[in-house]
Amino acid sequence: MSGGRKIPEKTLVHNLEDLMKTAAILEIGVEDLPAGMVRSALEQIQKLSMSLLKNYRIEFENLSSWGSSRRLVLYIEGISPVQKDAVEKEIGPPKNVIYDSQGNLTVAGERYLKAKKISEKDLGIQTLEKGDYVYIKRYTRGEKTINVLPVLFQELIRSIRFSRSMRWGEANFYFGRPLRYILSILGKQVVEFEIAKVKSGRKTRGHRYLCPDWIEVPDVESYRELLRRAKVILDPEERKAKITRQIKKVISELQAKGYKAQPVKDEELLDELSYLVEYPTVFCGEFDSRYLSLPFFILEACLRDYQKHFTVSDGKKVLPFFIGVRDGTRYNLQEIVEGNRRVLHARLNDAQFFYQEDKKIPLEKRVPDLKGVIVQEKLGSYYEKTKRLVKLSEKICSELKIQKEIKERVKRAAYLCKADLLTTTAKEFPELQGILGKEYALCSGEDPLVARAIEEHKKPRFPGDTLPQSLEGAILSIVDKIDTLSGAFWAGFIPSGSEDPWGLRRDAQGLVEIILDKKINIQLMWLINESMALYGNRRYDAKKKLGEFLEGRITTLLRDEGVSHDRINAVMRVDKDNL
């Protein structure tokens, strides 16, 4: 049986009600979780609960996981009132010790039965590698589910993992955010347990602003309806559908006014908002059209990334409207729109000022000032990194026999690619680093191919992102990533377990993907040696560890592509150094 905690002594089924299937609910009330944590937690709850129910021999018909930033919910339908009985095998002595050649019990066999307090009918024979062995059939009668769920629910809660966790109360308990309450009911009964000094019960809370009071839930059947009355839509998919319908209505209203507004397509933001709100109401506002002169990526950062607003376009250019989602009803909605407009105007005004001021200084003139921007104490400044990137770019281009004009563009891009870190716009919008570099390079009169390489050197930014399309961008991205990896391993910042604060796994994965995508014929150990040589003191152990780390990324990539385990091993044995 799973889990280390003791389940109460078994309770006999006394009446017909105990034999009827019912439903169970577990709601974990928390302080506000980021949307990404909610999504991950709900996926884990679904998988973990299926596994735990199987391990604890509890049959069920269906599982659902719902939630928002304030609550994580597991809903189990058709749950059996008792565990399945268990039959376990206890392997004993060899068969010839217990039985003679005629199949009769030996003296040792009789002693064995007496010692184990069993009869011969409890024995079975199983063939193992070393021959036939006797085993004892152990029967365990199933407990009432109400007695098992406390242990199961505690194990479930403790098993949920977050990208970043907090610790409070119990010294050994971690969670994404502090627990505030736990609702736990099977049918009409409270499933009683305690975790992190929070006791389970039958109380939940409604919407934070609209119905903030405690709600007592008499049974699982009334749970969803009680929360719906309290302005909480539990299912993220239902909230998402509601947001989508309302956005379509807003677009139709803009079209009716003569604007060639196109339906908003932003699944990522739609998903995020569906996890952040519990009772979504869509609103639309208008901002000053003078801000439309800003590059699209700055407009999008202001609207989408910071304000969580959808942009509106006519298919070619952005229109001066924003679509937002309120967590609440339509009451006082116009004031909400006006408040959002004021905040957005302030941010757009700052962005426009920063952008115009940053354009006044050519990118090339900013490079020497990178001496004052530290990568990390052990790794020096971004100016030192820039010099390494230029040197390594030249070495790789020479090794690959790249045409002279392409090599010069790569070196130029390597010299300029970190300069946008010094712009005020990049400090305000750090996620635009590289994209801003391209924009300011073009404003400074740089070769468009150099500017493109500056943008592409940050790719891929996230799993599934596009890879660099130009050869210049691909080489510079490889150079930047291997320099980051070499520096980190040289300084001892090696990922362990789930800890990877530098995002080195992402860089390693991106490095391998680019090399394979562009079919770049380069030896990994040569690349590591050349890169680490630029850090001065040679450290063989760091090179070896980085080589193994990259081999691991190659294996992961091949496995994700569906390559069999045997083929991966064969490939890695033959020539793991040459991608």
Image: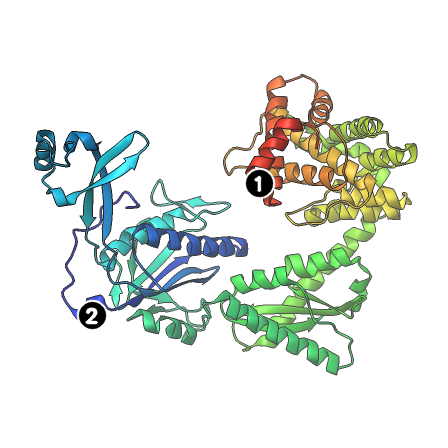
Residue bearing the label numbered 1 = 564
Occupied quadrant, residue 460: top right
What residue is at 70 percent from the left and 71 percent from the top? 263
Give how far across and how far down residue 254 sits, in percent: 72, 78
Give how far across and how far down residue 218 sits, in percent: 28, 71
| Closest to the observer, 485 or 105 | 105
What residue is at 75 percent from the left and 46 percent from the top? 424
Give the structural element (helix, strand or loop) at label 2. Answer: helix
Mark 2 or mark 1, whichever is nearer to me: 1
Would residue 391 be found to the left or right of residue 539 on screen? right
Q: CA distance from mark 2 to mark 1?
A: 51 Å
Residue bearing the label numbered 2 = 17
Q: Does residue 228 appear in the picture of this structure?
A: yes
Give how far across and how far down residue 57 sits, in percent: 29, 54
Give the structural element (helix, strand or loop) at label 1. Answer: loop
Tell me the tag on residue 156: none
Labels 2 and 1: the sequence-earlier one: 2
**Circle 1: residue type:** Ser
Q: Does residue 418 appear in the picture of this structure?
A: no
What residue is at 77 percent from the left and 51 percent from the top? 354
Occupied quadrant, residue 317: bottom right
